[in-house]
Image (cartoon, coloured by chain):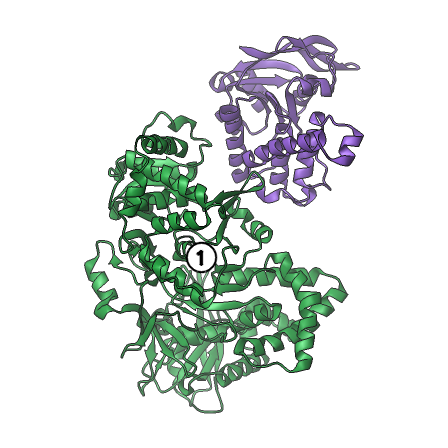
Amino acid sequence: MENRDPLLEYSIPQLLRWRVNTSGERTALREKDFGRWMPYSWDQYYDYTRRAGLGLRELGFGKQDKIALISDNIPEMLFVAIGAQALGGISAGIYQTTLPDEIGQIIDSLDVTVVFCNDQEQVDKLLEVRDRIPNVKKVIYEDDRGMRSYKSDDWFMFIDDLYTLGDAAHQQDPALFEKLVDAGSPDDTCHFCLTSGTTGLPKGAMLSHRNYISMGLQLTEVDPLDQTDEYVSFLPFAWIGEQMNSFGVAMATGIAINFPESVETAMADLKEIGPHFMFGAPRIYETIRSQIWLKIDESYRFNKFCYNYFMKIGEKAANYRMTGKKMPLKLRFLAWLGKQVMFRPLINQIGFLRLRRAYTGGAALGPELFTFYQALGVNLKQIYGQTEIIGIAYMHRDGDVRPDTVGKPLPRTECKISESGEILSRSDSVTQGYYKQPEKTEELLEGGWLHSGDAGYIDENGHLVVIDRISDVMYNNRGEMFSPMYLENRLKFSPYIKEAVIFGDKKEYVAALINIDPIVVGKWAEDRGISFSTFMDLSAKPEVADLIYNEVVKINSNAEQEHFKIHRFAILYKLLDVDDGELTKTGKIRRKFVREKYADLYEALYDESVTEKAVEASYQYQDGQTTTVQTKIRFYTMEEKS
Amino acid sequence: MATLNVSYVTLTFGGLHALSSVNMEIGSGLITSVIGPNGAGKTSLLNCISGFYHPTSGEIQYNYQRLTKSSPHQVLKLGIARAFQNLELFRGLSVLDNLMLARHKNLQYGVLSAFAFFGKASRLEAENREHVEKVIDFMELEAYRKSVVGNLSYGVQKRVEVARALTLAPQLVLLDEPMAGMNIEEKEDMVRFIFDLKNEWDITIVLVEHDLGVVMDISDQIYVLDFGEVIGSGDAEQVSSNPKVIEAYIGEEE
């Protein structure tokens, strides 16, 4: 591969200009509009960027000024963002779903002076908080539908008028924009990416041109992309997962970015384009799998038979492929046959036929999903990183996909595990810090390393394993670390287990309270003629206990470390619920609350002499009434002691 | 300026007076609503305007042209389109096909040309598609372009019905209960579409609707029909304070 290091010395607008000079006529962007894919070449991309940039300059926007983007993914958003960056300005993406109050606060805290919106919906939000954002001088909108009554208000500006301003400035001084682009340096901050703050306002991570371009270069060093490759932009732009592609990967490699017609049509548009790589949160892959299952289920018997037969073959082959082992000849032939008659047509229906690599990140993905996609012939890989390091810093390599790890660091990315077990990284992509938050920045970048806040370790294959947020990990009484969330996820990957709470902080062993899944276990019981009345009744069935016991045995046998094994568990008689305060609004377990609420169960879990305990379960109905039920709860000890 | 004049229109079926001496002036670029209890003659009036029925007596003029004896396709050519209360769509065709088909009056190429799909045929089809796509964009039907109409929810089908009327590039649309059977959210969307039709496409709208809240909110002028007669007219305030209208809707006080 040619040496691409010189690209690191460009700013994003400079690199855009470089692309124009090397491959100006090629398609850079494509947008579906009025049912057609409208291409923009790199030449046009640069032209529009210049028009937007000079237009902004005419509005008084200059070096270090900030522009906020509240928009669906459209080419104009990139024109405006990169136009602003060419002037030395800084762009910042805000989620389209953000409510007006929060938009006001973000705009205020980031010192934004110009806002770009795509439609009336976003413009109306700004109008609502207008008196709280006095620094905002202009609001630029792209879609003038329903904007008729706003035209007399010069706070607003239609994007075409911005272009006209830019054109006029360009005519007056044709060399001006080039001079402005030349003045940029790769180490200038070019974008603020908001990181979700669990408390208070999101923080703006200051990211430089070099941060993005370096990430794009290092990622494609491992997984090369061609100029002819396609990418579909359907993730929210405010998320690093989208910017890393539009700013980083696309500029570094010259791939084309395709913008869907609307949010609702994204999946249909993806099928039309057939991208070569994609990136998404686990939920997307889960949804697609459910759709496949559903369609196969509705299909006729011969299809179902073929699918089931080749799926088994595919899964076997996938296990060989993921670990890079050599397949036996017979399996190789059957896998090839399955691919030709079953899986190629199938993935063509989703638009994955040309997909060389699919990445998942942001949350844990069940191991069976990896096997599922790898069996279909979709090369699904885990990535790991955070906003502060442009999304991806660790990644599986082809032929070395291990579902429980996040892979190895990208080239020129250093990884270190601190003494406290925290994952530290260092690379060209690490942020300059948080805007106007020096203490937080100091904490984040202490000692020149990016502190992820995640606990992890490097396994014997050199893969990084992420355990949990460092503030959530626990230690048993021998000082061995474990992550309750990690173990809970393991349990929840079983279809029979809906929710689980892991205990064991400063205790001898790990124990769990388990919620069975009422639908799956209910069906399981029905199929076996086990009668039951309520959830409480079902939970107390000895057959159900056996079922869960076997699941725990299976999970224990896969435990990486001895002290991860669950030694004792009980099946809880009620589902954990948000209204009872046991879960947060986003569905996370409030561990401390649960432990206090079920203190007697907790004690019994750590008293091996107890096998059964009478409990009083109290329920609160929606109208506020409470009722108390007497029940017995059993405790189960796993046979092999940890 | 009135664009559609209905003067002394009477429609009888045997001895039944569906409409008797109805007078209306429908202003250009305005939203005019026709309301009234069930059986008041609202749909009969629309049928007279669109040429399905011919009035027994009286006259209907659109831009100084008589419509009284015109057939539906002649009315259409003058720029009046209609969305039906009971969806008149091909349930087995896709949204796109329904909309393309609605523009068949613009497709004037011969059999040979159609076979070769060259020259006029392909050019006209492309023009048609372009126009249809504008309507799809306007009515936000992108996600349903290729869906079969029969599989769509009722609310979306209603939107397709309105879109079908719009593909004919009318200057005036007759909307017969476009919001019947919709939930609040779908109604809000439809109201926005109607507003945008008026404001952005400068289309004159005649709306027959039962949801009085919506009618009072968006209409520039309202006519109230009862037993085939106009019993009140004016803006929302005038109509809602008209004793005859109150009586027709709520009933007479004992």
Q: Position of residue B55 (x, y in %)?
A: 73, 13
Q: Mark 1: few, some, or many residues within 10 Å (few <14, many ≥20)?
A: many
The residue positioned 75% from the left and 11% from the top of the image is B56
Quarter holding residue A86? top left
Indicate the chain coloured purple by its letter. B
Q: Amino acid at mark 1?
A: Thr
Outermost bottom residue: A640
Q: Position of residue B186 (x, y in %)?
A: 55, 38
Q: Is residue A211 visible?
A: yes
In the rendered structure, the answer to whether residue B13 lies left or right of residue A398 reads right
Q: Nearer the viewer, residue B239 or A536?
A: B239
In the rendered structure, the answer to whether residue A541 lies left or right of residue B47 reads left
- B176 versus A455 height, above or below: above
Label 1: which secondary element: helix
Q: Label 1 marks which chain's residue?
A: A
Q: Position of residue A451 (x, y in %)?
A: 28, 68
Residue that badge 1 annotates = A253
* Display colour for chain A: green
In the rendered structure, the answer to whether residue A407 lies left or right of residue B251 reads left
The residue positioned 34% from the left and 38% from the top of the image is A126
- A129 versus A485 height, above or below: above
Q: Nearer the viewer, residue A434 or A320?
A: A320
Q: Nearer the viewer, residue A486 or A211?
A: A211
In the rendered structure, the answer to whether residue B236 lies left or right of residue A125 reads right
Number of marks drawn? 1
Q: Is residue B36 visible?
A: no
- A364 versus A246 height, above or below: below
